Every structure is written in structure tokens, then in C-alpha cells.
Amino acid sequence: NKGVISRILPEEDMPFLPDGTPVDIMLNPLGVPSRMNIGQVLELHLGMAARYLGIHVASPVFDGAREEDVWGTIEEAGMARDAKTVLYDGRTGEPFDNRVSVGVMYMIKLAHMVDDKLHARSTGPYSLVTQQPLGGKAQFGGQRFGEMEVWALEAYGAAYTLQEILT
């Protein structure tokens, strides 16, 4: 699973389960179909069922629990048939209008930080052969500005920016 940190809240402002347990991380549900990763939803449900049953579950990547096994474990744990639960707003204490998929999932933090990725150049080295800017951050190169990027600036009416970039 991959995501971007949108907001960091104090624990008391995070939504919480009926037993008072606060949620650690909230993921955008639109990240599931766009990445075609239904496995993360099944992992979420299986992890929650295992938590209710007080058992440890290990599911290898390509030879793990089948969908029927997951739903069977959910039923055994006494969870709702759709495995969703009521969440309460951490700020008001009121329940949210819709039930939500909540579970236990393995997460890992990647060491990608904005400061390491940031790169900009105004003028710099050019290739002797093509007379185009070198590529890549390590060579103090430029970033390609393609057709679609030009169209996006045209759509916003950024004529002066386009003139500066393209001449």
C-alpha cells in the first residue's frame, strides 16, 4: 500500500472504535481500485478478525489465505457480515453516518523525504551532441516539459510562463 501523509492529528482527535481504541492511520478508499490491490482490504479484514480472536495470522504473499478463508475467519470472530464497523468522531464523539472498514494491517515507512527529492535548475550544463539540458538530479540536469504539461499551462492561460519555459 502506498500513500501520502495528508494530516497528522493528535490521538484524541482521531476516530475511535466502539471499545475506545483510536485509529492509527486512515487510508483513502480510492487508493484500492486505482492500484487494483483488493488484497489490502482482505488483509485488513483478516487482521481485524485475528485481533478479535486473539490469534496471530501469517499469510505468505503468493500462497496465503484464500478469500473464503478470510470470510470464514470474519464469521468465526463474530464480526458483521461485511466486516465494517461503526467509527466515532474523535472531536465530537458522535458516530459517523456510514460504517467503515477498519482492521489491522502491516505497514512500513519508506525513507522518501521531500528534501531528498527536490531539484530545480534555471540554467546549467547542456549535452554537446544534442544541445539539450542533461537529465537527472546528479548531473544538475533539467526536467522534461512534455506536450501534456504545455497543454495544462495553456488551459490555465499561463502565457508568460509558457514563453519563459519554451524559449
Image: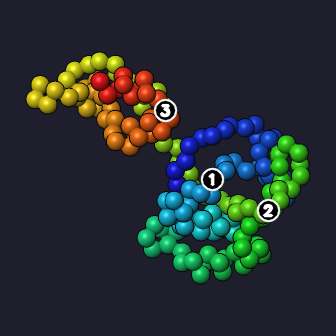
- Residue 90, label in figure: none
Q: Label 2 belongs to which residue?
A: 98
Q: Secondary structure at mark 1?
A: loop
Q: Quadrant of the C terminus?
A: top left
Q: Is residue 156 above or below residue 24?
A: above
User: Residue at (72%, 70%) from the top-left corner?
Assistant: 83
Q: Amino acid at mark 3?
A: Gly
Real-space Cα distance between discs 3 and 1? Answer: 32 Å
Locate residue 51, reporting x and y percent.
70, 64
Q: Amino acid at mark 2?
A: Asn
Real-space Cα distance between discs 1 and 2? Answer: 15 Å
Real-space Cα distance between discs 3 and 2? Answer: 41 Å
Q: Secondary structure at mark 2?
A: loop
- Circle nearer the N terminus (3, 2): 2
User: Residue at (60%, 79%) from the top-left corner?
Assistant: 69
Q: Amino acid at mark 1?
A: Asn
- Residue 157, label in figure: 3
Locate residue 33, reporting x and y percent.
54, 63
- Circle nearer the N terminus (1, 2): 1
- Residue 28, label in figure: 1
